Amino acid sequence: MKVLFIHSDFMRYEVKDKTRFAEEISPGEEKGEVKEALVAFLTVEKGDEGQIEETSAAAVEEIIATAEKVSVRTVMIYPYAHLSSSLAGASMAKKALELMTASLRDRGYDVTAPPFGWYKAFVLSCKGHPLAESFREIEAGEKAEKVEETAEEDFLVLTPEGKEFEPEAYTEGSEAFQVLMRKEALKEEHKAAEKPAYLRLCKKFGMEWEPMSDVGHMRYNPKGAIIFDLCADYATAVVNSLGLPVMQVKGTNMFDLSEPAVSEHAELFGDRLYTIETKRRSFVMRYAACHQQFAMIKDWNFSYKQLPFGAFEVADSYRLEQSGETMLAFRVRRMNMPDLHVFCRDEEEAREWLLNLHDRIMKEAKDLGRDYEVLINVSSREAYEKEKELILEILKREEKEGLIHFYLSGKNYYWTVNIEYVIMDAIKREREIGTVQIDVGNAERFGMSFADKDGKKRFPIILHSAMLGTIERYIYMVLDTAVKMEEEGRVGHLPLWLNPEQVRFVPVSDDHLQRASDLAEELRKGSVRVGVDDTGGSVSKRVRDAKTDWISYVIVIGEKEMRGDRLVVYDRERDENREMTLGRLLSEIEEKMEGRPFRQMYVPSEISKRPQF
């Protein structure tokens, strides 16, 4: 049996004329279409006839393996007699197609099978990435191997005490852990949810899709832009505070697939590759900072004396997420990865630094009032046993269980342990934010080596980490946290350091405008983002506008404030009016801002000078 796989944007067909083997079709079956699907052009050969069930089962496993690589659940099996000159009889070919269609449906796939024995016209759009086209020759003997591989992908729950449980039998843990376990291990589909409330906050803060680009690309108006840049600044500050020498680099985002190291890494990464085709060459858009950092560091000279060190870049990265699965600020095609790689002398040093990174990742979530569950992926049973002590140490530090995911064996993964840090969001969905991973393969693949104390050539162990997640996902967690505040009956607010406008003065009339402007300037000198509502209109309306804009502190300036230094300040976080001096307000802001980045506002201070976004 021969199969040509095409990962497609869409495939449309229309029946034209019968052959003498044509099956009868009902009205409405003359046409068909699938979108975001794997199309399998399939030819059944004479050699398949004596073992049609076995060969069909082997083909099903190959289809599923390919569908998983390109992350689709929709398949079209298209009978195609042009891949071989040694064709099976029509009845055997039809039987194979029926067996395969039924088996795939039983496995949860949405399968379309055009009518057998008809001449058909079709229109096909191929996605064009490196895994979008592949060819397989399938024999019945492949079945056992494929079934065995699939059976080895498994999950278990591990407690800090070292006890192991099958996920089906585990009823302990937080609600968030149960949500993670049911989705990942038990494959329970989420029920359809209401429109996520965080989208309202995306709109409020100027984050939206760019309609003139590809699917999954975002744009940021000034409020969103400063939030984005502050998050990137903070990610950089976190990395630089680790007590590790960090080399900050910059580079390009596209790499030549004819380079062996690049193509091998892309093949191991698997699906969702974003590619660019030119007349002579094919390029992959980087899906993290790995390519650029590794391409650069292979040219560096360093010894064991310089290790460990980090390499860091906030890297624009690209993943071809399915168009129907993109999610504003969470699942995007162009993301920005604050990507840290820690280069270590050996596995022991790598474990030590992984624990350091883990502690900081957990702290950053707690600072936002969130807590992570951990999904710990291991590349094999052997890797699990080897790293079990490390995994248990992580669970003991958090005093909670973890979900262990065993990947399929038989594949030369470049990593051994990959930890995903997951929150449960406001609509009770698991959302991966941060990551850390032990990489044992890419140093040699890319030619990054160092001299040990004996002068011998060694390859470092590399830790990959996005400690805050992508910038977009960190913003998602911030907004989702605000939604949870509202659900708990509190006033939703942003952390002060992230608020695009931290303080707003509302002068009662033009007579009070200069006083408001002078006070604003004093705060501005103290590194505070300050606005002045000089638009006129009623004070109550302008105060409502400030609260609608989620300003952290709102201050009305009237006759009383003209004469004295006491101010009545609306504090959004507390949702109350407080009386204080300007100096006390500035001190409070400085305390809350300690260790956090600052940027001046991206819009004019005066409300009257701002466009309507």
Image (tube, helix red, strand yellow):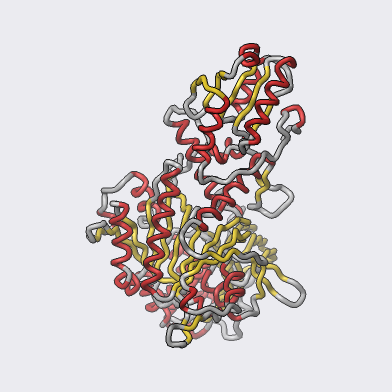
Q: Position of residue 145 (x, y in %)?
A: 39, 78
Q: Position of residue 478 (x, y in %)?
A: 51, 42
Left or right relative to 112: residue 181: left
Vertical relation: 125 (above or below) 373: below
Q: As rendered, which of 319 and 146 lies closer to the eye?
A: 319
Q: As rendered, which of 328 and 69 lies closer to the eye?
A: 328
Vertical relation: 495 (above or below) 396: above
Q: Single out the residue that lies furthest toward the top.
A: 559
Q: Position of residue 110 (x, y in %)?
A: 51, 58
Vertical relation: 98 (above or below) 435: below
**Within the image, what quadrant is residue 361 found in?**
bottom left
Residue name at image x 69 percent, y 55 percent: 214
Q: As rendered, which of 269 and 89 lies closer to the eye?
A: 269
Left or right relative to 62: residue 557: right
**Within the image, what quadrant is residue 547 found in?**
top right
Assign the C terminus to one quadrant of the image.
top right
Residue name at image x 72 percent, y 28 percent: 607
Would residue 18 be seen by someone viewing this image from the given angle?
no
Q: As rendered, which of 74 and 155 lies closer to the eye?
A: 155
Q: Position of residue 481 (x, y in %)?
A: 47, 39
